[in-house]
Amino acid sequence: MRTGAAAGHVGYYHEAILYDSDEHLLAVVLPFLLGGVEAGEPTVVGLGERNADLVRRALPAGAGVTFLPGADLYARPTAAIRAYRKLLGSYVAEGARQIRIVGELPPAALGATWDWWARYESAINHAYDDFPLWSMCAYDVRDSPSRVLADVVRTHPRVALPDGSHKPTDAYTEPAAYLAEPRPMLPDPLQRTGPAVELVDPAPAEARDAVRAAHRGQLPADHLDDLVVSVSEVVSNALRHGVPPVRMRLWSAPDRMVVTVQDRGPGPADPYAGLLPAGNGAAGGLGLWISHQSCNHVALHRDTDGFTIRLTAGNPYFPV
């Protein structure tokens, strides 16, 4: 039987903490964690180092709370989803009737790569809904950009408050609708200049060769191989499922390589494409799934010109 605010709720009970002080954060998190321990529920912290230490010091000794390496969890959205689903599955297999988790994204995720983390925050409303999970995602309103906070209230059904209340976010949007919305792609500064490579309707082998030829040693060998495979998959998808012409553009910098692939079609119909495995045979699902696991950032963009995928290998954390 589930306890606390999620009592009687079936599936995922997803909340945000929009805090403006350490005291605010602790006022929400401590009762949440201690209530889980008291109820005998798996109770987990996936915060960054500073906030994890803050919470650890505030908890009574031997509280029975599990601390995860928060920064390691959030290398990529797909990796986070896989890791959490594995953890949740293990708790359910052991008989857990409810699991409590408080976590936060690393600061870098709130910058240039926020778009795919916003997609993650939306998609997990679906991806975790087959588990009895109650989680809280912490965002510091003092240094979270306004565009991030606007997405947070659209991807979290509720906000947990220090007085113990749980307020619905009137802006919450169901993930299938949220993920299907067209959004501008935050341009990488490299894209302000002409690309080093531009190909029209390239064969996958030609695309692979172009990536290898443009490499200047800025990527480790395995990262280069991952980018080559991702570009090949995305180009193959565009040629097979998109609307011609297919245009591939590539930029190279000392710390990263950026590739865009554009076609005139609408892009994948599956709103979860890339973040979750394509289990329904959706067109192009495997290629996006591979790229989301292999690249340091994947951005998707739809507009009147068609559908564009941008793949970044190396450092995607440019100034915004």
Image (cartoon, rainbow, N blue to C red):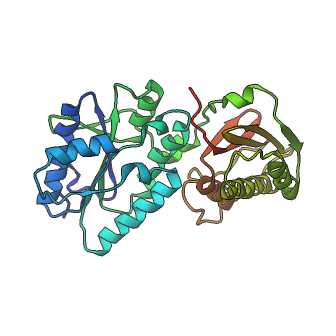
Residue 98 is drawn in which quadrant? bottom left
Quadrant of the image containing the N terminus = bottom left
**Residue under the image location 24 percent in, 66 percent down:** 97
Whole-percent x, y for residue 96 in the image: 25, 68
Residue 163 is drawn in which quadrant? top left
**Residue under the image location 81 percent in, 43 percent down:** 248
Q: Is residue 218 above or below residue 37?
A: above
Q: Nearer the viewer, residue 106 or 36?
A: 106
Q: Is residue 112 left or right of residue 204?
A: left
Q: Nearer the viewer, residue 92 or 68?
A: 68
Whole-percent x, y for residue 101 in the image: 29, 53
Residue 165 in view (yes/no): no
**Residue under the image location 74 percent in, 32 percent down:** 304
Q: Is residue 134 left or right of residue 222?
A: left
Q: Nearer the viewer, residue 98 or 170?
A: 98
Q: Is residue 104 above or below residue 206?
A: above
Residue furthest to the front: 217
Whole-percent x, y for residue 252 in the image: 75, 38
Quadrant of the image containing the C terminus = top right
